[in-house]
Image (cartoon, coloured by chain):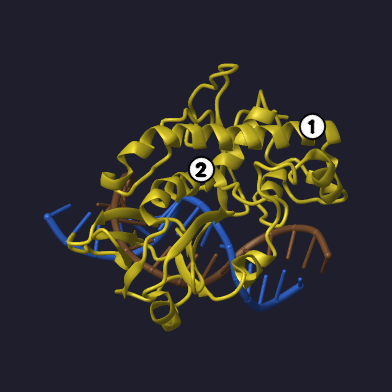
Chain colours: A yellow, B brown, C blue
DNA sequence: AGTGCGGCCTGTCCGC
DNA sequence: TGCGGACAGGCCGCAC
């Protein structure tokens, strides 16, 4: 269940091992991911050199001379850098064998993840073309969000989890950001004042950037990590805390379902 | 167009 | 101890 901070931490972890290295071999053990792994990938990526490791939303973009490998970790995916002699285990579906006898290995038990290939501009790829702004850029701000919120009746939690509005806000950080902003998750989006939407924008930025910062502390262990970034030690204020006391007011944290997703909030701090 | 929801997938946990 | 069912959730795609 990597959210954006975990994906960014992964990007930073793998980048130094991949940059300017040649892809010696592509191993696809199971092509049955979210979408079938294209056979073109191995043909066209083998022998090419990595020139960039970028991120767009929760997609990792490994740019090479001949095209781009687009990786999504889905719910249960993780990437590790390992000695290429390391035996693959169950759920290790995909390898990029690179120079220096290293391998970038994708493990994904639930296979919600994806490995795509494109020879063109990856940002124009079908999966990426329609995405909204990155949350940590100025493109995501109270002006644009206020316009998009106008007249909308859907719960604000669903709104901020919509990729057209802003990318990278998953179920956990959606609850956390709404707590920080003091907004009840079921509030109809169009009924929230511009000022409060501005608070929400800032809350999303701060919760995500703090999580990325915390991820940095685990980064040094990346190559020998167990591949489970987890949810860093960042203290979650509401997520998973149903029935416990709110750190802010002492009230009881509640859980409800919004769009078939569990949602946690403090009824006293969030209105 | 906006909204709501089913489906994909497997490991883990719970109750019987 | 074994087993079935619920749950976790990102994101697509369908139906209204």
Whole-Å distance between the Cαs marked 1 and 2?
A: 24 Å
Disc 2 crowd rating (10 Å Cα; few below 14, some 14-19, many 20+) is many
Reading the image, the residue beneath label 1 is A196
The quadrant holding residue A250 is top right
Image location (x, y in percent) of residue A74: 47, 59
> Residue A158: percent from the left, percent from the top?
67, 50
Pointer 1 indicates a residue of which chain?
A
Q: Is residue A93 visible?
A: yes
Q: Within the image, what quadrant is residue A256 found in? A: top right
Instruction: Tell me the SS state at disc 1.
Output: helix
- Above or below A163: residue A224: above
Identify which residue, B12 or A130, lies in the foreground. A130
The quarter of the rendered structure image containing the C terminus of chain A is: top right
Q: Position of residue A27 (x, y in %)?
A: 30, 73
**A147 and A52: which is toward the camera:** A52
Indicate left or right for A93 with A255 as reference. left
Residue at x-position 34% and y-position 37%:
A220
Residue named by callout 2: A5
Vertical relation: C15 (above or below) A231: below
Q: Chain of mark 2?
A: A
For the point 56% across and 46% down, the residue is: A171
Does residue A112 appear in this view?
no
């Amino acid at each position: 269940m990597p959210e954006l901070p975990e994906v960014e931490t992964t990007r930073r972890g793998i980048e130094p091992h991949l940059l300017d290295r040649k892809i010696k071999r592509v191993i696809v053990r199971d092509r049955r991911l979210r979408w079938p792994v294209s056979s073109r990938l191995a043909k066209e990526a083998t022998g090419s050199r990595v020139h960039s490791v970028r991120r767009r939303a929760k997609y990792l973009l490994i740019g090479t001379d001949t095209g781009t490998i687009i990786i999504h970790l889905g719910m249960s995916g993780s990437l590790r850098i390992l000695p290429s002699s390391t035996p693959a285990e169950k759920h290790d579906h995909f390898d990029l064998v690179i120079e220096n006898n290293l391998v970038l290995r994708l493990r994904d038990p639930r296979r919600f993840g994806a490995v795509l290939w494109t020879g063109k501009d990856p940002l124009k790829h079908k999966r990426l073309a329609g995405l909204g702004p990155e949350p940590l850029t100025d493109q995501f701000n109270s002006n644009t969000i206020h316009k998009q919120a106008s007249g909308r009746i859907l719960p604000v939690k669903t709104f901020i989890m919509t990729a057209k509005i802003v990318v990278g806000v998953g179920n956990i950080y959606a609850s956390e950001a709404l707590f920080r902003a003091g907004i009840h998750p079921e509030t109809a989006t169009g009924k929230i004042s511009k000022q409060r939407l501005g608070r929400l924008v800032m809350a999303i930025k701060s919760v995500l950037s703090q999580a990325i910062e915390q991820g940095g502390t685990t980064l040094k262990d990346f190559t020998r990590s167990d591949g489970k970034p987890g949810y860093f030690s960042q203290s979650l204020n509401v997520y998973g805390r149903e029935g416990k006391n709110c750190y802010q007011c002492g009230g009881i944290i509640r859980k409800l379902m919004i769009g078939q997703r569990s949602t946690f909030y403090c009824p006293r701090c969030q209105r």
